[in-house]
Amino acid sequence: MTDALVNVTDLHSHYGLSHVLHGVSLDIKRGETVALMGRNGMGKTTLIKCLMGLVPATSGSIRFRGQDIKSLATHVLARRGIAYVPEGRGIFKNLSVKENLLLAARPGFEGRMEWTYDRVLDSFPRLKERLIYGGQQLSGGEQQMLSIGRALLTNPDLLILDEATEGLAPLIAQDIWSIIGIVKRSGISTLIVDKNFKALSKISNRSVVMVKGGVVFDDSPSKLIEQPKELKSWLGI
Amino acid sequence: MDAATVLIQAMNGIQYGLLLFLVASGLTLIFGIMGVINIAHGSFYMIGAYLAWSLMGWVGSFWIGLIVGVTVALLLGLVLEWLFIRFLYDRDHLQQVLVTYGLILIFSELRSMIWGDDVHSVPIPELLSGSIQLTENLAYPIYRLWLSGVCIVIAILMFLGIQHTRLGMMIRAGESDREMTKSLGINIGLVYRFIFALGVSLAAFSGMISAPISSVFPGMGSQVLIVSFVVVVIGGLGSIKGAMIAALLVGLIDTFGKVIHLDIFGVNIFPEMSGMSIFALMALILMLRPQGLFGREH
Ligand SMILES: Nc1ncnc2c1ncn2[C@@H]1O[C@H](COP(=O)(O)OP(=O)(O)OP(=O)(O)O)[C@@H](O)[C@H]1O
Ligand SMILES: [Mg+2]
C-alpha cells in the first residue's frame, strides 16, 4: 500500500434526498493513469467533486497519501496536491490567459516546482501566442490547454480531468491526448473521464467503470476490451 | 446663476459624488463579488461619523482619530463577516436583507446607547481650515478640495488593486467561477472576509471625512444608504467603474437640483423637486438600460 496515493472506500454521496454514490471504492497509485468510464449520469463527476471537496461525502472515507481528507476544504485539498480540470474547463473569463496561469502558480505539496510558468508555455506554444487574450476569447481547445496548464502550475500529485476532450475537433483532441501523455510521463497520477473509449484505454494503466453510482469494473484496459457483452451494457459500445 | 456659482456648485457636486463613490463602491463590491445585498452598509458610514466625533473629543486630533477609526472599522468588518456575513453567501437575497436589516437595528440601538441621539458637529481640522482664492471673488474651502483629492486617490488605488495585484486577480477569479478559484488552492473565504472589511472601512472612512462638512446625526446611515443604492443601481450592480460614473452623476444632479430655480406658473418647482431628481434619473436609466450603465446583462 506504500505506493497508493488515493484510497476511496465505500463512499456515499447525496444531492439533497437523491442518493448518487452508492459505496464507491477506488485506489490510485503514484504515477498511475486511471480511466473513469460510465454512461451519462452514473456519478463520475460527482465522485470527482467529492475528491475535490466540492460535493460533501455522506459516508465512507477518502485518503490521500494515507491521510483522511474527507472533510477538508477544497482549497486545502488543492494545496495538498490535487488539481482539477473540470467539465466546461472553468476558465476565468475576466482574467487574461497570463493571469489565469499566474493565479494558479505555486510550489507543490513537498515544495516541488517541476511545472513553472515558462515550462507550461513551452509545452503549450499556442497559449504563448495568446497571453494577453481574455479567457473568453479562446477556442475550446485553447481553453482546455489553458485549464490543463493552469492545473499543472499547482504542481499536483494527482490531476483530475473531467470530460478531457469533450466538444473538441479530432485534431485538437489529439493534441490534448499527447499533452496527457506528457503529464503521465512526468510521473503525475491522473484520473481521466472521457467519451473516447479507444484513446482513453490506450493511455490508461487501469479502467474503472461506474454504473448507477457504483464501481462495476476495476482492472486493466485490456481485460475490459475482452468483455464485449459488458462493454455494451455498461458503456453502450 | 452666474458662472462663479455654477463653478462652485459643480465642485460641490463632484465632491459629493466622489464621497458617494467611496460608500457605494463597498456596496457594489460586496454585491458583485460575494453576491450579498448588505443594507447595513449605511450604518458603517454613520458609525464612522460618530467615531470621528467621539475620537475627536478623546484624542483631540482629527488625524489620529482617522487612523484609529479606520482600524476599528476594519476589525469590526472582519468580525461581522465571521459572525454573520459568511453564512449569507449561499442564501437568497431576502435572507441577506433580513440579516443585514437586523444589523441596522443593532447598530442603531448601540449608537443610541453609546453616543445618544443628539446631533453633533465636528470641526474642520486646523491644517485644512480656510479657503483658497480661486479668482478675485471666488473662494473654495480647502477641506473640500482635500476630501475630493483623497477620494480620487482611493479610487485610483482601487482600480489599480483590482486590475494589477494578485489579490485583485483572486477577486476577479472568484467573481467568474468560485468553485474553480477554490480548486486552485485559493482560500476564497479569506478573500471575501478581507473585501467585506475593506467595504466597511471605506464606508466608515467616508463617514469620518464627511463629518466636518455635514452634521453627525442618527439617521445619516439610512440617508446615505438610499442614495448609495441609487448609485449602485444606475452604475450597474457589481461595477466599480459604473459606481464612479453614477456617483458623479448623482452628486452633480442632486447638488444642482437644490440651487436651480425654475419657475413654472410662478411657482419655483426646483428646491422641492431636487430630492426626487436622482430617483427620476434612476427610473430613466432603468427604463433604457435595466442592467445599469455598466452592469452585465443577465
Ligand atoms: N447538482 C445536482 N443536483 C442534483 N442532482 C444532481 C446534481 N448533479 C448531478 N446530479 C445527479 O447525480 C447523478 C450523477 O451525476 P454526475 O454528473 O455525477 O454523472 P456523470 O457520470 O458525470 O454524467 P455525465 O457523463 O453526463 O457527465 C445524475 O443522476 C444527476 O442527475
Ligand atoms: Mg460528468
Image: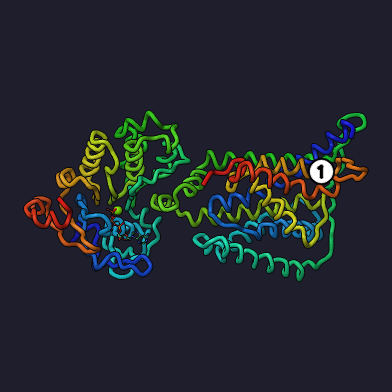
Q: Secondary structure at mark 1?
A: helix
Front residue of B174 and A106: B174
Residue topped by disc 1: B257
Q: Position of residue A12 (x, y in %)?
A: 29, 68
User: Which amino acid is tagged 1?
Assistant: Gly
Q: Looking at the image, can residue B67 be seen?
A: no
Q: Position of residue B181 (x, y in %)?
A: 43, 50
Q: How is the image coloured?
A: rainbow
Q: Chain of mark 1?
A: B
Residue B181 is left or right of residue B100, and the answer is left
Q: Ligand 1 shows up in which quadrant of the image?
A: bottom left
Q: Looking at the image, can residue B135 be seen?
A: yes
Front residue of A52 and A23: A23
Question: Which corner quadrant holds the N terminus of chain A?
Answer: bottom left
Looking at the image, which residue is at 39% across and 57% down? A74
Q: Which residue, as the protein is rendered here, is positioned at the far front?
A: B265
Residue B263 is left or right of residue B243, and the answer is right
Mark 1 near ligand 1 (CB under 8 Å)?
no
Looking at the image, which residue is at 20% across and 45% down? A196
Front residue of B87 and A16: A16
Give the quadrant of residue B65. bottom right
Using the image, determine if residue B240 lies above or below residue B136. Answer: below
Q: Position of residue B112 (x, y in %)?
A: 77, 69
Looking at the image, which residue is at 21% across and 53% down? A37
Residue count near mark 1 (Cα–Cα under 10 Å), binned few <14, some 14–19, many ≥20:
many
Q: Position of residue A216 (x, y in %)?
A: 16, 62
Give the quadrant of residue A149. top left
Q: Which residue, as the protein is rendered here, is positioned at the far left?
A: A226
Q: What is the count of numbered marks?
A: 1
Using the image, determine if residue A223 lies above or below residue B169. Answer: below
